[in-house]
């Protein structure tokens, strides 16, 4: 396989994953101190990253273009 074909295959796989997963959520831990400073506790805050389906469609289209692109003639 040529390098652009491998890149195209990777883009197709990533594009299909992006189309199947619409968001990614991760948690961060924050140290919170009470109003008088006597008490402290850990709070986990969720953060969500939304992925536009258009990104997956573009990745698949570019991957297909790389896979079906012009081949160098054999000499």
Image (spheres, rainbow, N blue to C red):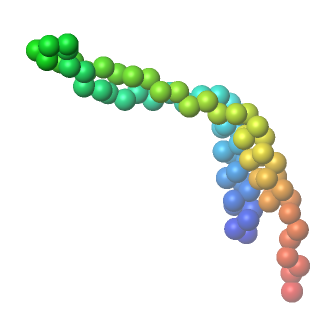
x and y percentages locating residue 39 in the rendered image: 14, 14
Question: In this rendering, is residue 4 above or below 75?
Answer: above
Answer with the quarter of the image where residue 68 lies. bottom right
Q: Residue furthest left?
A: 38
Nearer-the-camera pick, 50 or 65: 50
Give the left or right position of residue 38, taking residue 5 as reference: left
Question: In this rendering, is residue 44 above or below 4?
Answer: above
Nearer-the-camera pick, 1 or 13: 13
Q: Residue furthest front?
A: 36
Answer with the quarter of the image where residue 65 lies. bottom right
Q: Residue at x 67, y 37 (%)?
A: 18
Question: In this rendering, is residue 28 above or below 65?
Answer: above
Q: Residue at x 86, y 86 (%)?
A: 75
x and y percentages locating residue 15 in the rendered image: 71, 42
Q: Residue furthest bottom?
A: 75
Which image quarter is the N terminus in?
bottom right
x and y percentages locating residue 29 in the rendered image: 32, 27
């Amino acid at each position: 396989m040529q390098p652009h074909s491998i890149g195209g295959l990777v883009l197709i796989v990533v594009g299909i994953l992006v189309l199947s997963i619409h968001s990614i959520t991760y948690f961060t831990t924050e140290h919170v101190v009470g109003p008088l400073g006597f008490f402290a506790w850990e709070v986990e805050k969720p953060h969500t990253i939304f992925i536009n389906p258009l990104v997956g469609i573009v990745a698949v289209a570019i991957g297909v273009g790389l896979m079906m692109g012009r081949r160098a003639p054999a000499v």
